[in-house]
Image: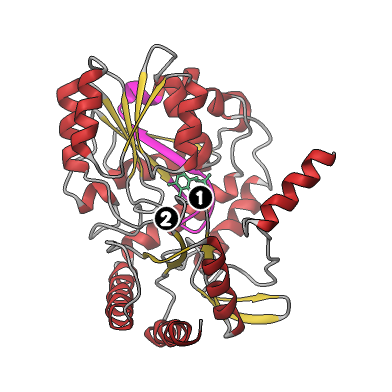
């Protein structure tokens, strides 16, 4: 007990203490916290669908038809028609023979890596990969080789040194930097080495590519062996859950063997119904992606004029690098006083000395709201 107390105190002293804020409104670009209204630039609700009335209506209709919960795992009696239809719609959307639903993206990543590799295998990871991909490698007990962010030359050496095979894993759009993995190079490398490639496109799917098919579409790489796609449903699609899309053999192996698939309750069927509706909207309303692109361009131009330190990102994830955890917290606090919510992201989520404001845009933002954010950021520069 003593020990934990000291640990928490140390965390506080290092400006690494995290606090949850209790939302009193639905997720959206305007949220209510502690009785105050904020314009929020920190959700992953990129298409503004989390509280779309049509998605909510599909959720309610799904609950009326299937009840509140699945009541069992997929392999017992938890796999409903709602899940089945969503899997088919997702497979068609991304252009894969099959898709398999998971309760979360975290579990989907654990499932793929730990099922395809054992302790004799090797997993190659970009250093900025999402925490769930790092944990997935640990769970698999495979050898882990990490390479500097985007350094495909180093990756080629590591793959060659491992003597072929293995699994290359990468974020499609990197969650904290917003840049995109070099998929054409990665897929070529995987092919030559006889390795597989797992792309976690949590932040690309629905958002990038003319039709929202994500990083594969944006980089003109077709989804097929040796590539496996993991997509999440709690971000651009605004609901909850995740899926893996791949060849028939990969998917069926996951059904038969993946522990994070087998030993857990299927997600509520109503969530699957809501997601099928948001998938339909994401496809039929390309203006959402086009508007997002305009907001991102407007922000980058404005931020460039202010001399802010941006990263090379063309996605709705636009970090402003500040340096220390303390600076990031301070800036976030100052924005908050002006009614603007932007999260300070600190180590260990990002490397030391790269603490930042992680600004994210949604199709529900207006240009005027982006301008308000820029004004507030300008104020920081002169008085921070
Ligand atoms: C959010 C996220 C996940 C986890 O997905 P959940 O469905 O929220 O568990 C996995 N990978 C990346 C890159 C993410 O950003």
Q: Please tell me which residue is depicted at 27% across the width and 64% down the height of the picture.
A: 314
The stretch of residues the image draws in magenta is: 232-251
Indicate whether 267 appears above or below 79: below
- Residue 130 position, x and y percent, is 44, 43
Q: Position of residue 261 (x, y in %)?
A: 54, 28
Q: Secondary structure at mark 1?
A: loop
Residue 52: image location, x then y, percent? 51, 68
Question: Is residue 238 magenta-colored?
Answer: yes
Name the residue nearer the viewer: 166 or 310: 310
Seen at 42% across and 55% down, the residue is: 176
Dot 2, how many residues are within 10 Å of its Cα: few (below 14), some (14-19), or many (20+)? many
Mark 2 — residue? 176
Q: Residue furthest right?
A: 1
Q: Is residue 54 magenta?
A: no
Give the labeled residue for mark 1: 349
Locate the N terminus by quadrant. top right
- The answer to which image quadrant residue 254 occupies is top left
Above or below 99: residue 340: below
Out of 203 and 149, give the one closest to the viewer.
Answer: 149
Q: Cα distance, mark 2 to mark 1?
A: 8 Å
In the image, is residue 6 above or below residue 161? below
Q: CB under 8 Å between callouts 2 and 1?
A: yes
Asked if the beta carbon under badge 2 is closer than 8 A to the nearest atom of ligand 1, the reply is no
């Amino acid at each position: 007990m003593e020990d934990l107390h000291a640990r928490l105190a140390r965390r506080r002293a290092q400006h690494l203490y995290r606090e949850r804020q209790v939302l009193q409104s639905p997720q959206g670009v305007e949220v209510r916290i502690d009785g105050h209204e904020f314009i929020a630039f920190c959700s992953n609700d990129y298409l503004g669908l989390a509280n779309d009335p049509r998605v909510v209506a599909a959720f309610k209709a799904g609950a009326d038809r299937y009840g509140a919960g699945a009541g069992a795992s997929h392999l017992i009696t938890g796999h409903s028609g709602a899940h089945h239809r969503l899997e088919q719609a997702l497979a068609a959307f991304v252009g894969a023979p099959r898709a398999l639903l998971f309760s979360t993206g975290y579990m989907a990543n654990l499932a793929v890596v730990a099922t395809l590799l054992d302790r004799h295998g090797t997993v190659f990871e970009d250093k900025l990969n999402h925490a769930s991909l790092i944990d997935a490698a640990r769970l698999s007990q495979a050898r882990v080789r990490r390479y500097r962010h985007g350094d495909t030359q180093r990756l080629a050496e590591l793959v060659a040194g491992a003597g072929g095979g293995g699994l290359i894993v990468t974020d499609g759009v990197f969650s904290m930097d917003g840049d995109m993995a070099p998929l054409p190079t990665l897929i070529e490398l995987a092919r030559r080495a006889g390795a597989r490639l797992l792309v976690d496109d949590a932040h690309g799917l629905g958002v990038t590519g003319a039709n929202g098919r994500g990083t594969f579409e944006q980089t003109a790489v077709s989804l097929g062996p040796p590539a496996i796609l993991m997509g999440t449903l709690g971000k651009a699609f605004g609901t909850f859950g995740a899926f893996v899309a791949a060849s028939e053999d990969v998917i069926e192996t996951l059904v038969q063997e993946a522990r994070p698939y087998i030993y857990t309750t299927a997600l509520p069927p109503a969530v699957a119904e809501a997601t099928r509706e948001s998938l339909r909207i994401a496809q039929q309303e390309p203006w959402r992606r086009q508007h997002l692109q305009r907001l991102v361009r407007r922000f980058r131009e404005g931020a460039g004029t202010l001399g802010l330190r941006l990263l090379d990102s063309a996605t709705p994830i636009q970090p402003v690098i500040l340096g220390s955890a303390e600076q990031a917290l301070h800036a976030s606090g100052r924005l908050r006083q002006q009614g603007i919510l932007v999260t300070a992201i600190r180590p260990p989520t990002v490397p030391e000395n790269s603490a930042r404001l992680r600004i994210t845009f949604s199709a529900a933002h207006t240009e005027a709201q982006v301008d308000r954010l820029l004004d507030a950021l300008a104020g920081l520069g002169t008085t921070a």
